[in-house]
Amino acid sequence: MMVSVYVILVLLGCAMFYYFTTPWLRNYETNKGLDIAIQECLGSGIESVSCSDTYNTTVKFNNGYTIQFWTANRMYAYASQGFVLKPDGTKTYWANQMPSRWTNRKLEKAVAPKSFL
Protein backbone atom coordinates (compact mmCIF):
# COMPACT_ATOMS: atom_id res chain seq x y z
CA MET A 1 0.00 0.00 0.00
CA MET A 2 2.79 2.45 0.92
CA VAL A 3 4.60 1.78 -2.35
CA SER A 4 1.53 2.59 -4.45
CA VAL A 5 0.94 5.88 -2.56
CA TYR A 6 4.58 6.80 -3.09
CA VAL A 7 4.36 6.01 -6.82
CA ILE A 8 1.23 8.13 -7.19
CA LEU A 9 2.87 11.08 -5.44
CA VAL A 10 5.97 10.81 -7.63
CA LEU A 11 3.86 10.67 -10.81
CA LEU A 12 1.81 13.68 -9.72
CA GLY A 13 4.98 15.62 -8.99
CA CYS A 14 6.44 14.75 -12.38
CA ALA A 15 3.22 15.76 -14.13
CA MET A 16 3.17 19.10 -12.31
CA PHE A 17 6.71 19.97 -13.35
CA TYR A 18 6.16 18.79 -16.91
CA TYR A 19 2.88 20.57 -17.67
CA PHE A 20 2.91 23.72 -15.56
CA THR A 21 5.08 26.84 -15.76
CA THR A 22 3.82 27.92 -12.38
CA PRO A 23 5.02 25.72 -9.55
CA TRP A 24 4.80 27.09 -6.04
CA LEU A 25 8.56 27.56 -5.72
CA ARG A 26 9.92 30.26 -8.01
CA ASN A 27 13.35 31.87 -8.15
CA TYR A 28 12.13 35.47 -8.30
CA GLU A 29 9.42 37.66 -6.84
CA THR A 30 6.37 38.90 -8.72
CA ASN A 31 6.49 42.38 -10.27
CA LYS A 32 2.94 43.79 -10.33
CA GLY A 33 3.74 46.49 -12.93
CA LEU A 34 5.22 43.92 -15.31
CA ASP A 35 2.23 41.67 -14.67
CA ILE A 36 -0.25 44.41 -15.63
CA ALA A 37 1.75 45.40 -18.74
CA ILE A 38 1.88 41.82 -20.03
CA GLN A 39 -1.84 41.31 -19.34
CA GLU A 40 -2.71 44.45 -21.33
CA CYS A 41 -0.51 43.32 -24.22
CA LEU A 42 -2.04 39.84 -24.22
CA GLY A 43 -5.49 41.45 -24.22
CA SER A 44 -4.67 43.31 -27.45
CA GLY A 45 -3.68 40.11 -29.25
CA ILE A 46 -0.45 38.75 -30.70
CA GLU A 47 0.76 39.98 -34.08
CA SER A 48 3.89 37.81 -34.39
CA VAL A 49 6.21 35.55 -32.40
CA SER A 50 9.88 34.90 -33.15
CA CYS A 51 12.51 32.98 -31.26
CA SER A 52 15.79 34.85 -31.45
CA ASP A 53 17.73 32.03 -29.81
CA THR A 54 17.21 29.03 -27.55
CA TYR A 55 16.53 31.12 -24.47
CA ASN A 56 14.63 34.22 -25.66
CA THR A 57 11.33 34.78 -27.43
CA THR A 58 10.19 38.06 -28.98
CA VAL A 59 6.46 38.76 -29.15
CA LYS A 60 4.98 41.67 -31.10
CA PHE A 61 1.49 42.67 -29.97
CA ASN A 62 -1.34 44.41 -31.85
CA ASN A 63 -1.12 47.46 -29.55
CA GLY A 64 2.40 48.26 -30.85
CA TYR A 65 4.33 46.88 -27.89
CA THR A 66 7.09 44.29 -28.29
CA ILE A 67 8.27 42.07 -25.45
CA GLN A 68 11.37 39.91 -25.46
CA PHE A 69 11.66 37.53 -22.52
CA TRP A 70 13.54 34.54 -21.13
CA THR A 71 11.91 31.21 -21.93
CA ALA A 72 14.38 28.72 -20.49
CA ASN A 73 13.88 27.15 -17.05
CA ARG A 74 10.13 27.27 -17.53
CA MET A 75 9.43 25.61 -14.20
CA TYR A 76 10.79 28.38 -12.03
CA ALA A 77 12.24 31.27 -14.08
CA TYR A 78 10.00 31.70 -17.16
CA ALA A 79 9.87 35.40 -18.16
CA SER A 80 12.27 36.34 -15.36
CA GLN A 81 14.20 38.79 -17.54
CA GLY A 82 13.67 40.70 -20.75
CA PHE A 83 12.52 44.04 -22.04
CA VAL A 84 9.41 45.86 -23.20
CA LEU A 85 9.75 48.01 -26.33
CA LYS A 86 7.04 50.68 -26.34
CA PRO A 87 5.53 52.09 -29.57
CA ASP A 88 7.47 55.35 -29.03
CA GLY A 89 10.77 53.42 -29.14
CA THR A 90 11.71 53.42 -25.45
CA LYS A 91 12.85 50.17 -23.84
CA THR A 92 12.18 49.11 -20.27
CA TYR A 93 14.30 46.22 -19.01
CA TRP A 94 13.53 43.85 -16.16
CA ALA A 95 15.61 41.15 -14.50
CA ASN A 96 15.22 38.86 -11.50
CA GLN A 97 11.46 39.53 -11.41
CA MET A 98 8.52 37.69 -12.91
CA PRO A 99 4.87 38.24 -13.79
CA SER A 100 2.33 36.44 -11.64
CA ARG A 101 1.84 32.70 -12.00
CA TRP A 102 -1.48 33.24 -13.77
CA THR A 103 0.02 35.70 -16.28
CA ASN A 104 3.02 33.43 -16.88
CA ARG A 105 0.70 30.55 -17.70
CA LYS A 106 -1.43 32.73 -19.96
CA LEU A 107 1.68 34.06 -21.73
CA GLU A 108 3.06 30.57 -22.29
CA LYS A 109 -0.25 29.27 -23.65
CA ALA A 110 -0.55 32.25 -26.04
CA VAL A 111 3.03 32.04 -27.33
CA ALA A 112 3.66 28.28 -27.45
CA PRO A 113 1.46 27.46 -30.49
CA LYS A 114 3.23 30.16 -32.50
CA SER A 115 6.81 29.24 -31.58
CA PHE A 116 8.98 26.18 -31.06
CA LEU A 117 8.83 26.33 -27.23
Image: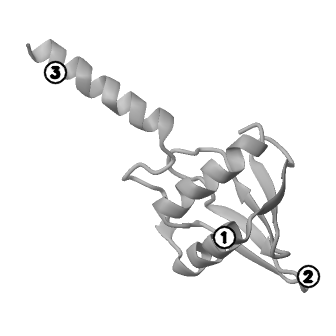
The answer to which quarter of the image holds residue 35 is bottom right
Question: What residue is disc 2 on?
Answer: 89
Q: Nearer the viewer, mark 1 or mark 3?
A: 1
Residue 72 to residue 9: above or below: below
What percent of the width, then of the height, locates residue 12?
32, 30
Mark 2 neighbour density, 10 Å: few (under 14) some (14–19) many (20 or more): few
Q: Earlier in the sequence, mark 1 or mark 2?
A: 1
Question: What residue is disc 3 on?
Answer: 5
Q: Secondary structure at mark 2?
A: loop
Q: Earlier in the sequence, mark 3 or mark 2?
A: 3
Question: What residue is disc 1 on?
Answer: 43
What percent of the width, then of the height, locates residue 34?
61, 75
Q: Nearer the viewer, mark 1 or mark 2?
A: 1
Q: In the rendered structure, which amino acid carries the disc numbered 3?
A: Val
Find the distance from the CA under tag 3 to the CA under tag 2.
55 Å
Q: Nearer the viewer, residue 27 or 116?
A: 116
